[in-house]
Amino acid sequence: MAEKLLLLDTASLYFRAYFGVPDSVKAPDGTPVNAVRGLLDMIARLVNDHRPTRLVMCWDDDWRPQFRVDAIPSYKAHRVAVEVPGTTGVEEVPDTLSPQVPIIVEVLKALGIARVGVPGYEADDVIGTLVAREVAKKDRAPVDVITGDRDLFQLVDDAVPVRVLYTIRGIKDLMAIDQAVLKEKYAVSSGPGYADMAVLRGDPSDGLPGVPGIGEKTAAQLVHRYGSLQGILAARDAGDPGLTATQRRRLVESADYLAVAPAVVRVAPDAPVGELDDRLPSVVADAGALVALAETWGLSSSVKRVVDALAG
């Protein structure tokens, strides 16, 4: 079988599962397990549909890394539920989702599916690092990134290939994002071009202000005209006539933001991810623990679907 690597943005998927599966789905003791069951069903579906040889559940060890907050203090600030001294705060998460996350961890361990997070980094950075490692290999495998986060469109690269399978229409009907789709939908021709456009446009959902007055369409036009954010800033500093006076003024006024935003928007290609065995197992790692977890949390049908998919 040809090599194929699937990288899953786990939090993106279990949030989607939580809101997509009724909260009436509960364990025998009454604990909601809708996110757990939904995520397991997603994994089974992805394995059956895409037949990867390697798979990694990428984890947010830090949802709001200090290096991003230091650069742009508003980064995800509106999502902080509890201020904790010495940290960037606790993320606002539904009360009935938080207790399900440790269950997900235990079930993945018993299955033997690789799960990787890095202190001080987001899952996006883990994904970016694993993509960079694969790209650097001589015999590299095609990579599909499963996420509902448009930020990861910056990793799209037809040469590898790296695609993003975007969950906008759900896990059953993923939208495959390649360079042709980036060009059609966003008028940028590459993953790095998407990142540059995103810096200029900003993203209110992440607390990134962008350059006031420069929206997605204008940002894409500027990236197309000058090739990159670096090219745009060089044109700004040189007084290039291709920039209107208003555009140049806005870029000058946003100089401080533009100096730090790329490091916030771009995913880290070099997070300290240790060596990992990302082979997709055909046999579960700990059958006894898996049976006990399935019985305790009422997950037997979903666990069976994953086990059958792994054996398939």
Image (cartoon, rainbow, N blue to C red):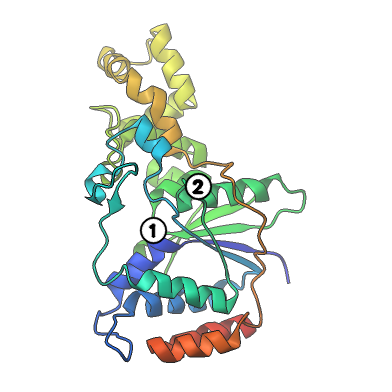
Left or right, residue 269 beside residue 222: right
Q: Quadrant of residue 18?
A: bottom left
Q: Position of residue 67 (x, y in %)?
A: 42, 36
The disc placed on residue 148 is: 1
Q: Nearer the viewer, mark 2 or mark 1?
A: 2
The disc placed on residue 125 is: 2
Seen from the viewer's position, the closer of residues 179 and 257 is 257
Q: Residues within 10 Å of mark 2 (few under 14, many from 20)?
A: many
Q: Give the CA separation, mark 2 to mark 1.
A: 15 Å
Q: Position of residue 202 (x, y in %)?
A: 31, 36
Q: Residues within 10 Å of mark 1 (few under 14, many from 20)?
A: many
Q: Amino acid at mark 1?
A: Gly
Seen from the viewer's position, the closer of residues 48 and 96 is 96
**Residue 48 shows in the view:** yes
**Residue 172 shows in the view:** no
Q: Residue at x 43, y 92 (%)?
A: 295
Vertical relation: 234 (above or below) 113? above
Numbered disc 2: secondary structure: helix
Q: Position of residue 170 (x, y in %)?
A: 37, 69
Furthest-front residue in this view? 85
